[in-house]
Image (spheres, rainbow, N blue to C red):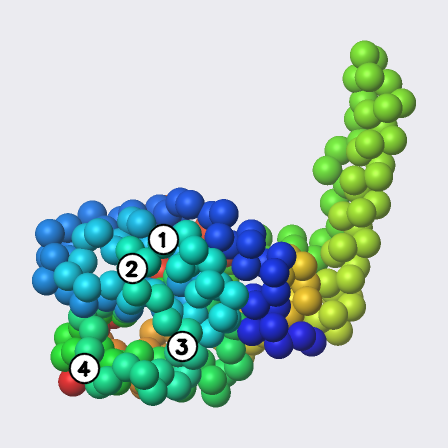
Amino acid sequence: MLDHKILYNSESISDEYAKRDYLEGAESAIIKKFGSRFKKMDMLDMGVGGGRTTKYFAPLVKSYIGADYAPNMITRCRVKYRGKYSFMESDVRSMNMFGSNMFDFVLFSYNGIDSFSHEDRFAALKEIKRVLRSNGYLYFSSHNLNWENLSDLFNFKSGGMGTDKKNGSRDFIRLLGSSIKSGFKKLRLNILNRNLRSKDFVQHLKEKQRGLIYDNSLNGKASVYYITRAEQIRQLEDAGFKNITTYSRNGTNTGNEEKLNEDGWIYYLCEADK
């Protein structure tokens, strides 16, 4: 397994991330929720990547720092924004360059926290709490282990092999090639996860309420952390956070498990309990 930092620091991935220019529905929802309150907040945009979220949050807050542990990501941000905002190389697990009680709002988007092991994940949460002021906010996303379609990541499905009369065999060959490629990709993920019975594998992780999975992200070159909502709330409470609420990826603020499990990501909003 390759180290996540090496992957994110590669030219190809950092270039790809630098091209991204949008907000997830849950990110737009948090901007709407805080509104003018952002004007009084010092913000840390951790795991900023290529600066996808910068242009949307930075103009709203009192002060803004974008941070990432991949140097090439920070380079892309500085080129992209031409010195307009501050960007720093920093590992969330040990943010020595930031003082305690320095920020009012920390954003850790795009499941950045899922790049770490269980132990490092807790270290990251403790560090985030340290740099937040009392009752400061953490908002982050994480892979949802109870996602209703999780097992489908590893199951081969043909996707339909029908053809129409107009395109005939050309469509058949194209669809056949696509299906074979998809089949090999999913077989590879099953092998990487060391379990060809996907439902049994996923069920085992659900019983533990957390675990590492090779999925479609990063081309299957590194495993990512998946966690249930209940376990993530427990971890946040253990790390010293309170008033924990959840958002669906499309931006619905809800604690309804059925609604949240329609998607592979859950966003968490919580406050530092100091």
**Helix or strand or loop: what does disc 1 sit on?**
helix
Q: Please tell me which of labels 4 and 2 falls first in the chain.
A: 2
Contact between marks 3 and 1 (CB within 8 A): the answer is no
- Residue 27's spot in the image, x, y percent? 32, 52
Q: What's the amino acid at mark 2? A: Tyr
Q: Residue at x 84, y 39 (%)?
A: 177
The residue tagged 3 is 90
Q: Quadrant of the N terminus?
A: bottom right
The residue tagged 2 is 85
**Helix or strand or loop: what does disc 3 sit on?**
loop
**Helix or strand or loop: what does disc 4 sit on?**
loop
Q: Residues within 10 Å of mark 4 (few under 14, many from 20)?
A: some
Q: What's the amino acid at mark 1? A: Tyr
Q: What's the amino acid at mark 4? A: Asn
In the displayed orientation, state which residue is furthest to the top: 166
Q: Residues within 10 Å of mark 2 (few under 14, many from 20)?
A: some
Query: Is residue 269 among what the camera can see?
Result: no
The residue tagged 1 is 81
**Helix or strand or loop: what does disc 2 sit on?**
loop
Q: What's the amino acid at mark 3? A: Ser
Q: Tell which tag, 3 or 1, sits nearer the viewer.
A: 1
Mark 4 → mark 2, Cα distance in angstroms: 21 Å
Contact between marks 2 and 1 (CB within 8 A): the answer is yes
Residue 70 as seen in the image, left or right of residue 133 = right
- Residue 83's spot in the image, x, y percent? 32, 58
Mark 4 → mark 1, Cα distance in angstroms: 27 Å
Mark 2 → mark 3, Cα distance in angstroms: 16 Å
The residue tagged 4 is 101
